[in-house]
Amino acid sequence: MSERIIEFREALCEAMSEEMRTDQKVFLLGEEVAQYNGAYKISKGMLDEFGPRRVIDTPISESGFSGMAIGAAMRGLRPIVEFMSWSFSLVAADPILNNAAKMLYMSGGQFGCPIVFRGNDGAGGQLGSTHSWCIESLYANVPGLKMAIPYDAYDAKGLLKTAIRDDNPVFFLESERLLSITGHVPEEDYTVPFGQALIRRQGADCTIISFGRPLYFCQEAAIELAKEGIDCEIIDGRTIRPLDIETMVTSVKKTNACVVVDQSWSFASIGSEVASQIHRYCFDDLDNFVHRVHSDDVPTPYASNLEQAYLPNTRKICEAVRGATYNT
Amino acid sequence: MPIEITMPRLSDTMEEGTLLHWYKKVGDVISSGDVLADIETDKATMELQSFDDGIFSKIIVQEGEKVEIGKVIALITEEDESPAQEVSETEPAPTKQDYEQGMTISPIARRLADEYKIDVHNIQGSGPSGRIIKRDILQVVDTTKETSSAAATTKPEEIIQPLVSEPEVVATSHSIVSIAPWRENRSEPLSNMRQIIAKKLVESKQTIPHYQVTMSFDMDPLLEIRATLNKQLVSSGVKLSVNDFLVRCCALAMAEHPAFNASFGGDCIYYHGPVNVGVAIAIPEERGGGLVVGTIRDADQKSLRAISQESARLSNKAKEKGLSMEEMSDSTFTISNLGMFGVEHFTAIINPPNSAILAVGAAVEKPVVRSGELVVGHELSATLSLDHRVIDGAMAARYLKTLKDLIENPASLLV
């Protein structure tokens, strides 16, 4: 493990910068990414290093600059599009879903779309209903795209480099709440492959599957549940598309109990998809139905206490694990 | 037209039967009188014979299933019919056990039960609405392990095959199950036998005016003659028990006192011809516990040796396989003996339609007065429970007097 400890946001910056140094086709565009060093200071110093032709400030026009970047990708460049928030990508749904994700198919293989869309996803902390979107369940429904959700600084760098090198459109979901966390990140070039989930905690009694920020709630819940004698295994899916169902299934076959924690709403969600696949592949291994933890089925509240209650928090996860393991 | 084989009524109290074993498989040629299956009724295991000739064409009720009387359990086609179409679909899955409708069990619990060969019908599920869950199965596995390792002769791994590929599962189970399961409140559904015991004995105790009369017997002469006989009988493999002597004594006394070989008939007293002595046999816990009464027929006509052999046979069969209806019916008097457990005195509940039951304690070494002198001797105390509608106190006393004469002068038992 590397001795160096840096912030999540620095790891993202390092991934983009390293790839831009080695591949002239890679460039970054988005609101405030250049002169302001990024709305969240992720692209700090990049304008100075790569200049305004490769680090481009855009107008507040997601649909326009997304479409432009997709055109660039079709012609062979490898753009990175930063959405200040994935909430703002909704106005660019047509280019990113209808064009980027379907281009290879609709052009009969003539045009690919090697592009990365990245930005903050999920409740950032009192941003209100319209700016707290978890878009993973909406967008993962669409074939032709990949989707990654980094958990820590190490994965942030490793997964983002894989995303930039991928020839398909990759939706890269960061969390504003995680940007300042620190972790060991190697200085050298490394990647984290897509479709390889990671067991974040070993346990025997219940498998908890999650992605991104809710994994921290899962860790807290596991500590709490350990006091009650319930030994949780936590799986970080890392990428939603492709989904490493094998690692999840192997774990559930061992524990015979499963809880899926997904920060999006429950109806037709990542959680329902994972649960469905676990039911399919682990049918004879389950002691109870797969329990799910989601954000409550309401628009994200603004009030801090309500927002905390709304999220797939530690309390909800503990309750679900107790339920799944018949320890109520 | 195929012939329908239905669940027969094999005893008066039977309402449903469990299909234990099919002796025939689909396609077998059946002749009238062939044994088709073993059926477990409320108390006995009985053979089901065919009344028809034909080809065994379809199994409808699988082994282990319990169905009501009259329900079709199998089909026989006459030999000129073509059973071909039916045959293909009737082969039962051999390894899976059958689950009753409405019974809920989690998939992993079901799989573990199949792998460990655990009968789930006797398990009370601890999940919601009684769902049987993994923990319930592992508890049974663990209890079985404990029981089997306690028995010094058996290796635990012979009983429990760890079929689950992941050793973690078993390790986990241990940590869960080690939370002393016997401390938890739990309920178990009644077995067929327990239901019958409950029903019959409540009926007996509530409708029969019971009273008890106790007498002590000097056992020294009997024990002496028993020791002598057993020494001589070693080569023939016969070992007479105290109970065998008591069966003969009671039977001879019954022949002399017909009221003890009688039943209360409402408006009459029914005196039985044959003297049939029932012997209460405890069923071991591992076979579900409970007790049955095996019948030694014409006990007054049988020698000690014949009584002993019949008694041993019934006892072994009851414990291993279960008794047939015939082996349990028609007793006219019952002996319940707890002497082998060191019990000195107890009272028993009359086994209807008997009029009396003898509760026998142990032959205990104690100071006794013989010809005015205090000596050490063996004494046995036995208590009659009686149906006052048939037998009055003085009659009971006279019966016990006869019994005492027989027991204390055992040479007469040999002729």
Image (cartoon, rainbow, N blue to C red):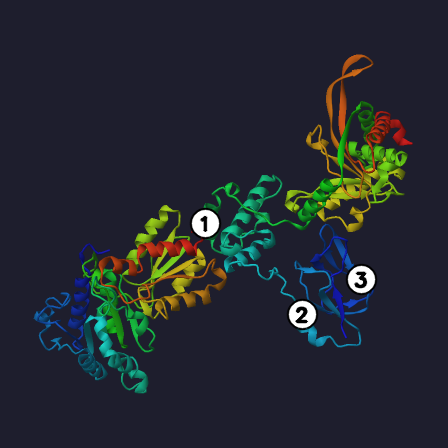
- Element marked by disc 1: helix
Task: Pinpoint residue B247: horizontal percent, then vertical percent.
Answer: 82, 35
Which one is earlier in the sequence, the residue at label 3 or at label 1? 3
A170 over B373 or under it: above or below: below
Q: Amino acid at mark 2?
A: Thr
Q: Quadrant of the N terminus of chain B?
A: bottom right
Neighbour tally class for label 2: few under 14, some 14-19, many 20 plus, Cα within 10 Å: some
- Element marked by disc 2: helix
Q: Residue at x 46, y 59 (%)?
A: A288
Residue bearing mark 1: B172
Q: How many marks?
A: 3
Asked if the residues shown at circle 3 and circle 2 are in contact, with their CB atoms under 8 angstroms apart, the answer is no
Question: Which numbered dot is residue B410?
Answer: none
Residue bearing mark 2: B90
B209 over A239 or under it: above or below: above
Displayed quadrant of residue B207: top right
Task: Pinpoint residue B320: horizontal percent, then vertical percent.
Answer: 71, 46
C-alpha separation, residue under disc 3 versus residue under disc 1? 49 Å
Query: Is residue B285 rendered to the left or right of residue B389?
Result: left
Residue bearing mark 3: B34
Q: Amino acid at mark 1?
A: Thr
Q: Residue at x 28, y 82 (%)?
A: A98
* Nearest the eye: B46 or B392: B392
Query: Is residue B63 rendered to the left or right of residue A140?
Result: right
Whether residue A129 can be seen here: yes
Which one is earlier in the sequence, the residue at label 2 or at label 1? 2
Neighbour tally class for label 1: few under 14, some 14-19, many 20 plus, Cα within 10 Å: some
